[in-house]
Image: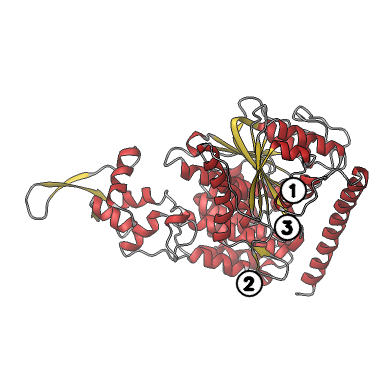
Amino acid sequence: MSDFDDVLVSRADIARRAGVRRPAVTNWERRHQDFPGPVVVERADGLGEIEVFRAPEVLEWLERRTLPANARRSDEPAGTTYGDRFRASLGGTRTGALLKAVQHLGGPEAERFRGELSVAEYVTMLLSLVYVRGCRPDGWTRVTAEANRYPVPHSGELLVRLLAKAVEQGLGPGHDELFLALSRKLGDSRVADTIRLLDEAGPAQRTEYAQAFEWLLARYGELAGRTAGDFFTPRAAVDLVSKLVAGEAQGVGSVHDPFVRAGELLSAASGTVAEGRQGTCPPEASGAGVGEYPLALAGMNLALHGLSHSDLRPGHTAPSAGLGPPGPPGFDRVVANPPFNARLPEHPVASGHWLYGQPPRHNANFDWLQYVVASLAPGGRAAVLMPDIAAFSSNPSERRIRSGMVEDGAVEALIALPPQLFTTTSISVTIWLLRHPRGSGDEVLFVDARRFGSMVSRVQRALAQDETESIFREYESWKAARTAGRPYPGTPGVSRAVSLAEIRERDYTLSPSVHLSSNVPSDVQSADPRELNALAVRLAELHGRARDADAAVDELLRRYGL
């Protein structure tokens, strides 16, 4: 029961309290069959009847509608709903107590509460608790009842088992190993205190659970440093990728991520597409992941974002290891942040997606790129994060695959991001925008955003929201110019549309910096390909050794509390 059970509101009241114009309410009522129905009451002045709405029903409906970024006020964080505005106008509050409790546990109190747990295990426990509290109320009741049974509960192991059971009921069997280590390392009082602190936060809206989950994922990246690469994509890349694939959302029925990590890309892309579908059912979300942590976390993340029926399955670090592309009709949208420069399996078992040739054994980058293209439905589009080297590698196999993708019309655009966005590598990364092959290529858009962003820590760079919007506008402006049948002027030093003929002249080099630099030699074939390929292989090896060294340093610093 809420404080607003007896409150009735008119259409004008709804518009004012939700912060929209009056016609927007009429539009909601006309277009959405699930919009609350009006009730007829006598006018206060006795002059006839009037249609009004029950405030709790309107609030429940508005809670499902997230404010678009361009409609939020400066004091409204991402994830704010029209329902938050409506409730506040009626005297309710959006307390944020759950998020504050999570930030307390994951911030200054992390070391005290995690005990012998590793960073990954501790954050996994917090993420699991947020998921159970938000999506499995019956399971949460059992967990809190046990935590409050005695001043000091008799069994931390029992609490973890109850938590594991609740997760299993939501995500299905197969996650037992996720909690086995927790039950051996958690002290009784620590886990009970953690549960009680989260429970005392009081009621929370669905968006707050999603925000708390996302905050914990970002916090994990900060705590675990370069060892966080198993399941983490930086927020700047997530936001940009989700915007880039959300166009023409009304026709999008499926979104897929073949290397789902913690579900951050898949949940954001699916959510952005759902917003564009304007109230119709959300797209089908699916993905594949490697390891217990990523798959479990992805399932929790998606459920907290309203995608509880997502299809998540075990996957591989290289598609040719057995991740065969789906049959017809394929996916409408694909997003992916696959492992960089992974090796192909010694004996590939799936090669049907090699539409443009076999990738080199030492590098699965083009195994992934070809898999994504082969996974797209007709008219489908994709955004894939790749290390810069994939765009200019002189390896003969990779160059041949690049040429085949460009000539077949599968490559739409490449966007070079700044270095140090990722916790796992200091190298810069490029977004490949791909599409279902058209049979022939024309022009490719290149955007160079390497100079964007600012350092937010000693080792971490971030993109401001206006910078993300600026990058996205370059892509949108190029698409608008193509639709109108006019040449795209581009932005000097930032973006340029390059013809297929020029790409051929540059031997299918797809590095944005090459095509946007005014002093790049036109004869890009003058260097010895064998020498360039050897340097590329050596560079990949050095990056791997650097990651290992950084991880070892991070572990030593954490051991000494630094």
Please give the name of the residue rendered at 58% of the width and 70% of the height, measured from the top-left corner. 104
Characterize the local packing of mark 1: few (<14), some (14-19) or many (20 or more) Cα atoms within 10 angstroms. many
* Quadrant the C terminus occupies: bottom right
> Which dot, 3 or 2, sits closer to the camera?
3
238 in relation to 371, above or below: below
Q: Which residue is mark 3?
A: 228
Q: Nearer the viewer, residue 254 or 69?
A: 69
* Quadrant the N terminus occupies: bottom left
Q: Disc 3 versus disc 1: distance between alpha carbons?
A: 27 Å
Residue 479 spot, x, y in % from top left: 55, 42
SS state under label 3: helix
Does 15 sit left or right of 276 as displayed?
left
Q: Disc 3 versus disc 2: distance between alpha carbons?
A: 20 Å
Specify which label sits upstream in the sequence, 3 or 2.
Answer: 2
> Which dot, 3 or 1, sits closer to the camera?
1
> Which dot, 2 or 1, sits closer to the camera?
1
Residue 112 spot, x, y in % from top left: 67, 72
Characterize the local packing of mark 3: few (<14), some (14-19) or many (20 or more) Cα atoms within 10 angstroms. many
Q: Which residue is mark 1?
A: 511
Does residue 548 appear anywhere in the picture?
A: yes
Residue 205 spot, x, y in % from top left: 45, 56
